[in-house]
Amino acid sequence: MKDVAAAAGVGLKTVSRVVNGEAGVSEETARRVRAVIDQLGFRRNDGARLLRQGARTGSVGLLLEDVADPFYSQLSRAVEEVVRAHGALLLTGSSAEDSERERALALGFCARRVDGLVVVPTSADHGYLAPEAAAGTALVCVDRPMPGLDVDTVLADNRAGAAIGTAHLLRQGHRRIGYLGDAPDIFTAAERLAGYRQAMADAGHPVDESWIAMGRPDPLEVRFVLARLLGGPEPVTALMCGNNRTTVAVLRELAGRQERPALVGFDDFELADLLAVPVTVVAQDPALMGRTAAELLFRRLHGEPAPAQHILVRTRLIPRGSGEIPP
Amino acid sequence: MKDVAAAAGVGLKTVSRVVNGEAGVSEETARRVRAVIDQLGFRRNDGARLLRQGARTGSVGLLLEDVADPFYSQLSRAVEEVVRAHGALLLTGSSAEDSERERALALGFCARRVDGLVVVPTSADHGYLAPEAAAGTALVCVDRPMPGLDVDTVLADNRAGAAIGTAHLLRQGHRRIGYLGDAPDIFTAAERLAGYRQAMADAGHPVDESWIAMGRPDPLEVRFVLARLLGGPEPVTALMCGNNRTTVAVLRELAGRQERPALVGFDDFELADLLAVPVTVVAQDPALMGRTAAELLFRRLHGEPAPAQHILVRTRLIPRGSGEIPP
DNA sequence: TGCGTCGGAGACAACGTTGTCGTCGATGGC
DNA sequence: GCCATCGACGACAACGTTGTCTCCGACGCA
């Protein structure tokens, strides 16, 4: 900018005025300045601008587990759309379920002075974000609550959803229903398992603990679990899967086996309707969740005071075939 | 920082030294400063730091068509991984194939002084990025080249891939092969179509222009096209699909029809192997492309001079069934 | 005691902007 | 001809850091 001013033979402030389209510059001078700007390829340094103005940075951080997961990539896109509508930019980071990594990313975002953070929190304590929140960084959780900090939160109705899916299987006459979920320290995994238990209890059917397998959806692990659930003297006749990756891993493993247990997956996925046996799922709405979270964030940024809100997004059962297989 | 200095009764520079772990501060003083920092919840303002140091910002922009598309979300994740390994942060933006939006995002990123940009360019001219490139912003294109600017570029071997897929269908005895691709102003769409034509020409089989349909993968459009291709007096016996979204749209439409033409898709997708008829595809490697692009970017940032590189990533045919259906 | 040295610590400028205020010349009214 | 007014423009400080330089007191040594 200094260079532009020198080259155009005007004062620094005049260039600033031209760049920002402020009044008080003759058209003649403005033209000259613009010419020099184009010639020198000058671009305003937003960092300095923000520093000076002490204003918002017009940027938002998004922290989730894995952008490549379809659930999160849809959520991510929805957040991005809202952020863009507000003229802001989006920083994205995948925590890979590693709380240390998440922490580093979050603090990195904050050091860049993002206006707000949309977070899918890991299960670790997030007290370290309290100073940031206190300093005015808006904070919204989505998909999971944030341990150690009470902030705006958008969750799917995991418990009810898993209960609905399980009840659906019970209605088909299944009694021995296996449950495969993610690691139990993950909020959604625990909630959904609770939903399964609740549906079984409500129907008055006891749960054999050996039907339950919680852990990362590793193909080998899934193979082992399915062999156990389907291969014993009293095999389960139906499976409830706790998330889309588990569902897919199970489908892939089932393709290599004889048994065709009924199956309901939690979370919808592309092509579920086109599989050999179309897959019945409890669908979430990741786009709605992302949009809601982002809008909540901007409402905060626009000064909405109110206490922390907790929003529950409904899930819905989509029967497609796999969940209607009789025992 | 000023506040911390005042509260701790030390000079500004001393706080700076403590924050940055520089030498020249007695342990006693450092402890006191750290205590005040914790108490006040102070975080260094990286904007000011960067401004002062005139150094790199440690941030990279990623500009693609749509984060929610599995191809791009995998590419995105790979880029993120490399960026993280270099201790940088990632800004993401979806252009939605709108060059004006892309331009706004790119300039926004540059105003934030990203060190570099990884871009999946739209087909519009990108001359506006020349000043940025000249100013030292590293620039790498991935998936498509950038019209109007010669920069590092990572592309899939679209032409060869489409040719291989088409040749595969020809080998099964197909002669009337339909081609459904994306809008022809998209580089990859044009290249793949060219590959199809080339394979047909190499095999000495004429192409009827009515077999070719190029456009956005809209369900209704696909329905119309398939009705035409499969319903006429001389229906095509095989289909080559130019991208994953088209493939999925075609599969969905085919599910409601009687005909079972052979089908090869360009770009792999999850569950392709588990469909009623597993889908033969020409697979790309989005993660490899993203990783390569990001690594190229950081090599530039670390001062590798060399002229712009153009890297071609190979594709490979994965026969699964749908491409081996005879005429 | 005098002098050099050394470690700890602060003063100050500068990074690239922008808000505030002042200057300067032209214009208009009396 | 004089003063008030106004528009165009520049000087300067400040945003929150950090690099450089300087200062000060303690210490060792002759």
Image: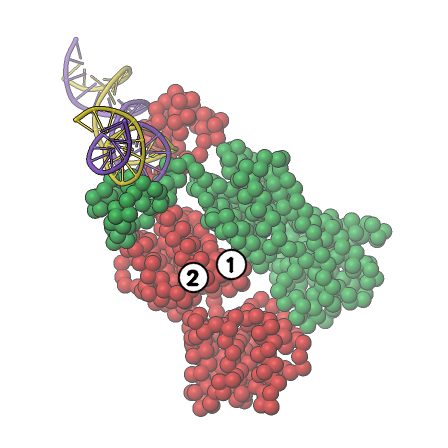
Chain colours: A red, B green, C yellow, D purple
Mark 1 touches mark 2? (CB < 8 Å): no
Inspect this view and state whether residue B222 appears: no
Distance Cα–Cα, label 1 vs label 2: 16 Å
Where is C28 relative to A62, above or below?
above
What is the tally of numbered marks visible in this picture? Answer: 2
Residue at screen point 45% across, 40% down? B56
User: The N terminus of chain B appears in which quarter of the rendering?
Assistant: top left
Callout 2, which amino acid? Ser
Question: What is the crowding at mark 1: few (fewer than 14 residues within 10 Å), some, or many (at least 20)?
Answer: many
Residue B174 location (% of width, % of height): 81, 61
Residue A136 location (% of width, % of height): 30, 53
Residue at screen point 50% across, 81% down? A212
Circle 2 residue:
A99
Q: Along the horizontal axis of the image, is B18 left or right of B127?
A: left
Residue B175 lies in quadrant: bottom right
Question: What is the crowding at mark 2: few (fewer than 14 residues within 10 Å), some, or many (at least 20)?
Answer: some
* Closest to the observer, A120 or B120: A120
Q: Can marks 1 and 2 be said to lie on one chain?
A: yes
Circle 1 residue:
A67
Callout 1, which amino acid? Val
- Chain containing mark 2: A
Q: Along the horizontal axis of the image, is B184 left or right of B12?
A: right
Residue at screen point 46% across, 26% down? A35
Residue A231 lies in quadrant: bottom right
Residue B311 location (% of width, % of height): 66, 44
